[in-house]
Image (tube, rainbow, N blue to C red):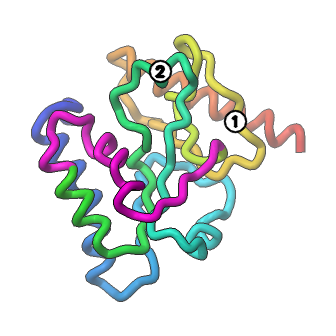
Amino acid sequence: RPNLFSPEFRHLMVEKMNAMEDAWREKNWHAVIFLDADLIVTKAFIPDLVNLPQQLVLSPHHLPPELRTRSTVGRFNAGFVLAKSPAFHEWWREAFLTRPDRFMEQACLDDAPGIFDAFLLDQRANIGCWRRSWLTRFAPIPQDCLFLHVHLFQPVDTLEGFLQRSYALYCQIGRASCRERV
């Protein structure tokens, strides 16, 4: 896997916009959704989002206050994006390529709600290791969780890798306890 800040990794991130463009070219869809491969869908939700009147659906990180002030990754997570406007992927690509000083393909999404009519997912969506206090004190997984964002195969050779793997294990335990309560 290329280093997160390498030109090779940036090239991989632009493939998100390219995939959305390919989908729009394939057919005149009502909406195009990009989902990272490391999302685990836990409840049907996409038909509800497609029927919303907004042009764009984004997923905030919902960082806890102690991490929110230090975060440089942007307000939204780029692992889930729903667009009803074929112009979105073009805007996203341009915003990403022209601002290499911002964090990857995510930080430029901060500007999207000012350009596109956007709906923001609530805390039931895109739950990842970034929703933690302290090092590995993760927020409870809501019973009505829509999807988890879990990096299952992140190497454990850095602190970030350790956090990602710890969160993957937490999700396994947390989802099991949710099933027991039902």
Kind of residue indicated by mark 2: Leu
| Residue in the foreground of this view, choosing between 167 and 82 | 82
* Quadrant of the image containing the N terminus: top left
Residue at image position (34%, 27%) is 72
For mark 1, give the secondary structure.
loop
Q: Is residue 108 magenta?
A: yes
Of tags 2 and 1, the one toward the viewer is 1
CA gap between label 2 and label 1 equals 16 Å
Give the class, few, some or many, for how many residues have Cα within 10 Å of label 2's Cα (few <14, many ≥20).
some
Q: Which residue is mark 1?
A: 141
Residue 18 appears left or right of 63: left
Look at the image and give the residue range highlighted in magenta.
96-123
- How many numbered marks have been drawn onto this rendered protein structure? 2
- Residue 53 on image: x %, y %: 56, 74
| Residue in the foreground of this view, choosing between 65 and 49 | 65
For mark 2, give the secondary structure.
helix
Q: Is residue 58 above or below residue 107?
A: below
- Residue 129 on image: x %, y %: 52, 29
Q: Is residue 112 magenta?
A: yes
Q: Image quarter for residue 134? A: top right
Q: Is residue 120 above or below residue 175?
A: below
* Quadrant of the image containing the C terminus: top right
Q: Is residue 176 above or below residue 44?
A: above
Residue farthest right in this picture: 182
Residue at image position (12%, 41%) is 8
Residue farthest top in this picture: 134
Q: Which residue is mark 2?
A: 163
- Residue 96 on image: x %, y %: 20, 49
Q: Image quarter for residue 151? A: top left
Give the class, few, some or many, for how many residues have Cα within 10 Å of label 1's Cα (few <14, many ≥20).
many
Kind of residue indicated by mark 1: Ile
